[in-house]
Image (cartoon, rainbow, N blue to C red):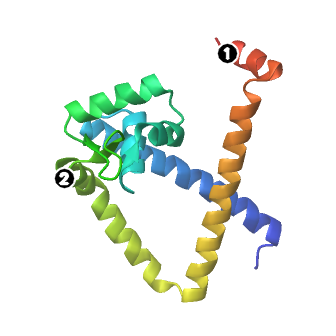
Amino acid sequence: MARNRQALIGDLGTEMQAYQRSTNGFDDEVGRLLRLNPADLRCLDWLSGGRMTASELSRATGLSSAATTALMDRLERKGFVRRVRDETDRRQVLVEMTEEGTDKVWQLYGPLVAEGAGLLKGFTRDELASMLQLLVAMRQLTDQHRLRLREESSLPTARALMSDQT
């Protein structure tokens, strides 16, 4: 018996939520093994895409400047990142993952990435394009609502809600 559209949408939502919990759990385990907290791991995730300035990293992670500096210091002491001068603007300092840091992270994430690529082999090009389109739209929607929450957090009603939780 074919399920109706609404039931499929509900099942998709349930599975996305379960996938998100599974991903968070996997990241928590990686952090435990590497002795990194969630913010440290999120920083490394951003840096896996390449060098960033401290201010770019601060915006990307949502951390304050001071918290970003402390995070960079912590990751540098542990050998995961290093600060380097920008070749084009020597006044600018960039943060990048070290080879050692990249190797440690890849040892844990690499097998998942390799097997994940295998999961995609059974899908057609059109199906993959549809999945990509969906993931991009979902990320954009989530980013939009994250920014909305950040903007609304300065409103009196949001401050009251946050103060009720302390």
Q: Amino acid at mark 1?
A: Gln
- Work out whether mark 1 precedes mark 2 in sequence or the reverse, and give the earlier one: 2
Looking at the rendering, in which quadrant would you find the C terminus? top right
Q: Is residue 52 left or right of residue 96?
A: right
> Where residue 108 sits: x, y (%)?
27, 53
Q: On the rendered image, what quadrant is the N terminus found in?
A: bottom right
Q: Which circle, 1 or 2, is nearer the viewer?
A: 2
How many angstroms separate mark 1 from mark 2 (CA)? 42 Å
Which labelled disc corresponds to residue 25?
none
Nearer to me, 118 or 143 = 143
**Residue hosting label 1:** 165
Residue at point 74% right, 18% down?
159
- Residue matched to label 2: 99
Given residues 149 and 24, the one toward you in this image is 149
Q: Position of residue 138 (x, y in %)?
A: 66, 59
Q: Quadrant of residue 95?
A: top left
Mark 1 surroundings within 10 Å by alpha-carbon count, few (fewer than 14), some (14 through 19), many (20 or more): few
